[in-house]
Amino acid sequence: MSLSIRNQIPGTVTAITSGAVMATVRARLAGGQEITAAITLEAVKDLGLAEGSKVNALAKATEIALATAPVAGLSIRNQLPGTVVEVATGGAMATVKVAIEGAELTAAITKDAVEDLALRAGVPVVALIKSTEISLAAA
């Protein structure tokens, strides 16, 4: 199956915490970073997830925010440090490719944000992704 989601990062499930309807699934990415996905218990069951399961963490480019430093006091669980590789701007929007350890992410942000943050190749950034915006696929 082909997907339009550009950000597909392989990882291994390290923990599953179940609630009444939802679960949080932690996975170690190829570069060693941890990522958390909040998915339904039904999805955990349907995907056959358990500790050690291979997964692909999926995140739409529009769901990735960028900061120029780690952000404290924030509910966003996933903060992945990286470096800007490329910036492509249009009239109102831009895509920013970010190299993180072991993978590359694409963020779709406004052109104004690119200018305000002075983003260009080589600038260190932190990719921020809410756990509810991470989908998982069995690898």
Image: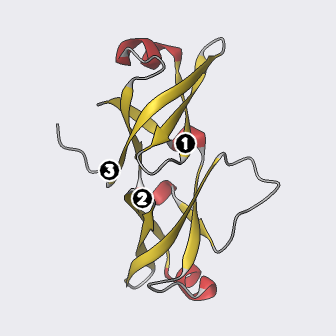
Taking the view exactly as shown, the residue that stands out farthest to the front is 32
Q: Nearer the viewer, mark 2 or mark 1?
A: 1
Q: Secondary structure at mark 1?
A: strand
Q: Earlier in the sequence, mark 2 or mark 1?
A: 1
The type of residue carrying mark 3 is Ile
Query: Viewer-nearest of labels 1 and 3?
Result: 1
- Residue 23 lies left or right of residue 120; in this view the side is right
Work out whether mark 3 precedes mark 2 in sequence or the reverse, and give the earlier one: 3
Mark 1 touches mark 3? (CB < 8 Å) = no
Contact (CB < 8 A) between labels 2 and 1?
no
Packing grade of label 2 (10 A; few <14, some 14-19, many >=20) is many
Write down the residue under mark 2.
Answer: 61
The residue that disc 3 covers is 5
Residue beneath the point at 37% across and 83% down: 90
Q: Position of residue 74 (x, y in %)?
A: 77, 53
Which residue is tagged 1? 35
Residue type of the residue flagged with mark 2: Ala
Q: Name the quadrant of the N terminus.
A: top left
> SS of the residue at dot 2?
helix
Up/down of 29 relative to 104, above or below: above
Query: Label 1 to label 3, Cα distance in Å?
Result: 17 Å
